[in-house]
Image (spheres, helix red, strand yellow):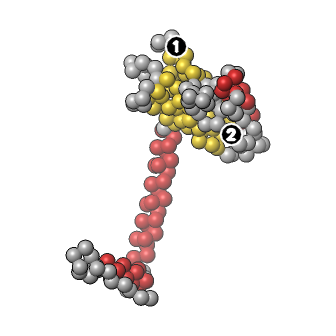
Amino acid sequence: MSIRFTTGARGGLSAWPVAIVLVFGLVACGGGGGSDDDKPEASTAASKSSESKPDAQEGDEEQTLAELKGPSGLFLKVTASERDAGGFITISGDLKNDGEKTVNIPAQLSGNETEIVRNGSSLGGATLVDAKGKKRYYVLRDTDGRPLTTTNFPALKAGESLPVFMQFPAPPADTAEVTLQLPMFTTGTLEISG
């Protein structure tokens, strides 16, 4: 192995290659010299890190805002409902196949508007209902008429999930709760954050 020294901006030799060699040397030699008492501490540290994982998973469970059940074992878990400064709200989560067979995502989720259906499968049929303001909000579209949602779904195998999102116009700032409706799914009430 050869070591190259380079000159720095001031013309002096740079010492960083020596530091790298020293680190590699310490790593290569690092296993010796300890007693057997050190090994239980390492396994204790490993068990502590594995103990912290369930806490992180519990945190994920707490983030579930709504659960919508659909046909053929499909299940939508909504994990975020955030207002954006641009005047829209983004709903995101996971679409999961809780069934035992592979499922194709139903075409009805795209809705029945010609402009949205023309752009392929999507969650374009979703709506948000603001009961307080007595308004229904439809999925936003870009300038070409494409819905601002997850599009072109693959078939979901049993137990498989897919991250999804939908964007809607934001209800007024004093509206803190909305109902998400998706064709063929149960409805879910969401609290808006942000």
Contact? badges 2 and 1 (CB < 8 Å): no
**Residue closest to the eye, 125 or 115:** 115
User: Residue type at mark 2?
Assistant: Phe
Return the mark for residue 1: none
List the single residue furthest toward the top: 134
Residue visible at 56% across and 35% down? Answer: 165
- The answer to whether residue 69 is above or below residue 159 is above
The residue carrying pointer 1 sits among few (fewer than 14), some (14 to 19) or many (20 or more) residues within 10 Å by Cα, namely few
Q: Which of the 4 image quarters holds residue 122? A: top right
User: Residue type at mark 1?
Assistant: Lys
The residue that disc 1 covers is 135
Q: Position of residue 104 (x, y in %)?
A: 75, 38
The residue carrying pointer 2 sits among few (fewer than 14), some (14 to 19) or many (20 or more) residues within 10 Å by Cα, namely some
Secondary-structure class at tag 2? loop
Q: Position of residue 143 (x, y in %)?
A: 56, 28
The N terminus: image quadrant: bottom left
Secondary-structure class at tag 1? strand
In screen coordinates, is 22 left or right of 183? left
The residue that disc 2 covers is 153
Q: Earlier in the sequence, mark 2 or mark 1?
A: 1
- Whole-number angstrom distance, CA of label 2 to CA of label 1: 29 Å
List the single residue furthest toward the bottom: 1
In screen coordinates, is 75 left or right of 100? left
Residue visible at 52% across and 26% down? Answer: 168
**Residue closest to the eye, 127 or 74:** 127
- The answer to whether residue 70 is above or below residue 37 is above
Q: Is residue 188 visible?
A: no
Q: Position of residue 9 (x, y in %)?
A: 25, 73
Residue visible at 43% across and 66% down? Answer: 44
